[in-house]
Amino acid sequence: MKVFISHKQEDSFTANQIANELKSCNVAYYLDVLDESMTQNGKELTDHIRDSLNNCSDIIVVMSSITRLSQWVPFEVGMAAQVDMPTATFLKEDVMLPDFLQYWPRLKKVADIRKYVSASNDVEQEYQKFRPIYEEAAFQQRKVERFYDVLKQRL
């Protein structure tokens, strides 16, 4: 598992808290504020974000009252959704989620990261037993749906 942490720059402190919790769970992550190769150029930045997302298996989206002003967070969520990447929102505060983020599980405190990791690991083990039975595309979709169900039960 490798988690892409999507956030608006002003939410970097919270994104770092998530990164630290993932690290304590021995889970790899991508966080742009720690990426020295980040560029501010349009096409290069777009390509860099796409490549970074493609190297991740999951995405956690930090949501705050200022996230709606971001142009990159919806882009990152859209790219992740195209490949049915497991997605969860991390609510920094009591914020109204946009429609496109209502569906996914909502993490509300840093301790919920451990529940996220645990649910992901448990579903991965469960599905490894049945993998040969399913056609790959349908298998991935069912696995992601199962992950959402397990995580929502734990939150």
Image (cartoon, rainbow, N blue to C red):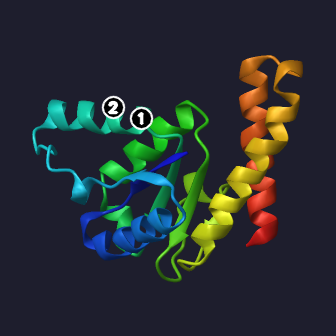
Q: Is residue 96 above or below residue 139?
A: below
> Looking at the image, do the residues carrying marks 1 and 2 touch, with CB atoms under 8 Å apart?
yes
Residue 80 lies left or right of residue 37; in this view the side is: right
Quadrant for the C terminus in the image? bottom right
| Cα–Cα span, label 1 and label 2 | 6 Å
Residue 13 visible? The answer is yes
Q: Is residue 91 above or below residue 25?
A: below
Q: Is residue 89 above or below residue 77?
A: below
For the residue labelled by badge 1, is the local secondary structure a helix, a strand or a loop? loop
Q: Position of residue 21 (x, y in %)?
A: 48, 70
Residue beneath disc 2: 51
Q: Residue furthest top?
A: 135
**Tag shown at residue 106:** none
Label 1 amino acid? Answer: Asn
Q: Position of residue 87 (x, y in %)?
A: 58, 51
Quadrant of the rendered structure where residue 116 is?
bottom right
Q: Position of residue 126 (x, y in %)?
A: 84, 43
Q: Is residue 20 above or below residue 35?
A: below
Residue 140 lies left or right of residue 42; in this view the side is: right
Q: Residue at x 49, y 63 (%)?
A: 22
57 or 85, nearer to the observer: 57
Closer mark to the observer between disc 1 and disc 2: 1
Q: Report the label total.
A: 2
For the residue labelled by badge 2, is the local secondary structure a helix, a strand or a loop? helix
Residue 35 lies left or right of residue 29; in this view the side is: left
Residue beneath disc 1: 55
Label 2 amino acid? Answer: Asp
Q: Position of residue 26 (x, y in %)?
A: 51, 58
Q: Residues within 10 Å of mark 2 (few under 14, many from 20)?
A: few
Quadrant for the N terminus in the image? top right
Q: Residue at x 70, y 51 (%)?
A: 121
Residue 63 visible? The answer is no
